[in-house]
Amino acid sequence: MDSAPGRTLRFHIFRFDPNLPGDKPRMQTFQLEEAPGMTIFIALNEIRERFERSLQFDFVCRAGICGSCGMVINGKPDLACRTLTSTFPDGEITLLPLPAFELIGDLSVNTGKFMRAVSERIESWIHSDPSEEVDLDHLEERMDPDVADKIYELDRCIECGCCISACGTKRMRESFLGAVGFMHIARFHVDPRDKRSDLDWYDVIGDDDGVFGCMSLMGCQDNCPKDLPHQAQIAFLRRRMIAAA
Amino acid sequence: MKVIYSDVLVIGGGLAGLRCAIAAKRRGQDALVLSLVPAKRSHSAAAQGGMQASLANVLRGHEDNEDVHFGDTVRGSDWACDQVVARMFANTAPKAVREMSKWGVPWSRVRSGDREIVVNAERITIREPEESQGLITARDFGGTKKWRTCFTADGTGHTLLYAMDNQAISLDIPVHERKEALALIHDSGVCHGAVARDLVSGELTAYLAKATVLATGGYGRIYSVTTNAVIVEGMGAGIALETGAAPLGNMEAVQFHPTAIVPVGILMTEGCRGDGGVLRDADGYRFMPDYEPDKKELASRDVVSRRITEHIRKGKGVHSRYGDHVWLDITQLGRAHIEKNLREVREICMYFLGIDPVKAYMPVRPTHHYSMGGVRTKPNGESPGLRGLFAVGEAACWDLHGFNRLGGNSLAETVVAGMIVGEYVADFSEGASLDIHTKVVEEALAHQAARIDELTSRSQGEDVFALRSAMQQVMMEKVGIFRHEESLQAGVEELRELLKRSRNIALQNKIKSSNPELATALRVPTMIKLALSVACGAAARKESRGAHAREDYPERNDRDWLKRTLATWRNPSDELPTLAYEDLDVLKMELPPGSRGYGKDVTIEHPDTAVRQRQIEEYKAAHPDADRYQISKALMPIDLPEKYRGKNERVGKGFE
């Protein structure tokens, strides 16, 4: 909230609506007076209400929790809702939609469809022992408190898509799973309730579309808004897959 | 005419909707979910602090059980909840937590042995029982007698929603994303589904189903400053209201959370205070013990919000360019605790305020947070006005919360109600067949198409964003924490004027496909009707109860107002809702009305209260050997789906 009030910001925003016949991709510039504590969420809403009603973008929680608002902000994928305009000293802010996802329009991309496909591909749910009886009346199964904390640590991914947009491998190889998928797998791998073995996982990620495809550029690690340990987890999964093979 | 059929149509992909869809699907019913956003982005994800269930694993949860949870919930509601529902809920909550554990939620666990905690601003050491090692732990929350709120750090909603959505994916339940239900399709008192608009292509589709479930969350965005996500615009309740047949319940029951950060209004979980944080004024003075010597910062939310407001009115607030606020101080909890159990809180402060709560106070003030009101339902989740229409979670007035919801009871409601209502939805769907004339469907589609045509062709008229903003200001200023006849009446008149103007909206962007202005224009008139239902209900209710605080009627008046407000919108051309009332029957209550224990008790008693108290005493005297289950069953019988009727085991207690 310390930024000087009254500064004029210049937003350079990618515009293209694939639904409109004949529309062509272009950049459009808007000028806006900065307000104290202004975020890109606040700025984009103001631009839409005051200057350009057709401008498309996605926000839901506007608190950095839901992962809806990933976009490329001055060259780096990040969550727009919690990015303060004051972090850009020259007041020039360029906004592009996340690459590697289907474009809905302007800054809005279809991460939902992508993430559902990832979930289906890696079966991102607990695979328990089917013979285990489901009984909700008895005491819950105990878990080592440290293990529970460790699962949560890896369960904090919000599927914003920044890792996918920052991934060199993904850009070259459409079928590459990507860091979001590896993080989910690492999460289930550490969870004692999930009974899948390394051999089961090998079938999912034991090839170039899986962990062996990663070129270790670590764009995921550098751009994850939740600071998840992508590098360590990909390395860990690689080791496990080599051992399993 | 595009038509999609399913057995069960669920509108809303948050926790409650997904759990309902899962219940139906597991019973062999074909379930389909419509959602404005990808399901994992639903507002359920934002719930930080936790989910109440009386597992009684921790030391300070010792002796907790369904009865204590039930009692806290009823007292918290200021006796306005449906006690049958509160009972169904309290009995099922432990099963819900245990089920979510099986589905992968990494609940934080009990570490047995000595641990340091902060209570009443002092560090003390307690010893967690050996026998609880590795069971699900719990933290303290406001308005509860026991530590009952189960959590995963402060990302509880996130972990629950991910586990739930993944479960839905495993069952192959389709979620149609970026679809907005614009109207319910109904005929002769039966709901047959909804007309939905694709927010990308603009295409209209009739989704037809035997059972339709509204799970769209609350209506927070009718207020200008709210903790709620931007999609929480109350459209589920809105389209129910617009049927003219399905009533909304207690719309005036609106909760303000004591601690959202200034100015952005993002919630700082009650866990901050539950874990030992305190509130301070401009002088750094801890003021809550002066107002509430017993519960202090952990009084119920409505109470703390009012006390903060009172204190600010006395000139003790911290002045800022965004108005006065107080401080939330969690510095005494220490870095290790904050970085582990309150890390979202810390992250939000760092990003939005540039401060580290390990070292600095957070600027907070009461901010709109939760909608206790919603689509009125019976205990089985069905609307009393339209057959085949169900509502669940915050969208519903199932009436678990009455006039004030306890922290930790909303996440719990989403999952528990999803489980229970989901079974009743499946029952209904199994026994029903879709019987609808295509003409009804055609008309419903044509009506929405005509609305869109009108909006995209009108050349001059009202600006939709200006109307929305005016409505939000009226609600904030005139239908807020403290209410008064004069300002409420003025608010109703202003909203009525806005409603008339909203019938003449003109758009700048006239395309029919993806168009945020058009989407807003389709919502705003409905939102103003919801706002009017809140304001009219508040103006009519001449008492103070829970979150509804009338300065001109400070007493809770059980004699005249122990009743639920029902709002319907009879004709589309009406300018005000029609209000009716449904009495709460004291003679059927398991827990007859009493004092909540905050401030001076100024309740005007209901004549049946003393009668009911005597009946209960007589029953207990005549049955000295009855256990708590027998007493509860005799005083207030409830029905639950067969699979949820079992007793809950507790460590060291068995099924006592």
Image (cartoon, coloured by chain):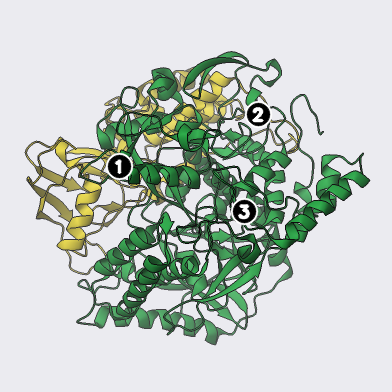
Chain colours: A yellow, B green
Q: Which residue is mark 3?
A: B400
- Residue under pointer 1: B315
Q: Amino acid at mark 2?
A: Gly
User: Does label 1 lie on the same chain as label 3?
Assistant: yes
Tell me residue B550's x, y (percent).
47, 59
Q: Amino acid at mark 3?
A: Leu
The secondary element bearing badge 3 is classed as: loop
Write down the residue under mark 2: B61
Judging from the image, mark 3 belongs to the subunit labelled B
For the residues marked 3 and 2, what is the alpha-carbon distance in whole angstroms? Answer: 22 Å
**Is B652 rendered above or below residue A58?**
above
Query: In the visual, does B461 lie left or right of B424?
Result: left
Q: Secondary structure at mark 2?
A: helix
The chain that hosts pointer 2 is: B
What residue is drawn where x is 77% and y is 24%? B652
Judging from the image, what secondary structure is the residue with disc 1 in?
A: helix
Q: Quadrant of the C terminus of chain B?
A: top right
Residue at the spot 42% in from the left edge and 63% down from the top edge: B484
Q: Earlier in the sequence, mark 3 or mark 1?
A: 1
Task: Looking at the picture, tell me which residue is in the foreground, B295 or A178.
Answer: B295
Task: Check if mark 2 and mark 1 are on a common chain.
Answer: yes
Which comes sooner in the sequence, label 3 or label 2? 2
- Pointer 1 indicates a residue of which chain? B
Residue appearing at x 60%, y 37% in the figure: B144
The answer, for residue B7, to whether it is visible in the render is no
In primary-sequence order, the first of circles 2 and 1 is: 2
Which is in the foreground here, disc 2 or disc 1?
1
Residue at (38%, 20%) from the top-left corner? A232
Q: Of B463 and A108, which appears nearest the observer?
A: B463
Q: Position of residue B6 (x, y in %)?
A: 59, 66
Query: Do residues under tags 3 and 1 come within 8 Å of each other at their CB atoms?
Result: no
Total numbered badges shown on the rendered structure:
3
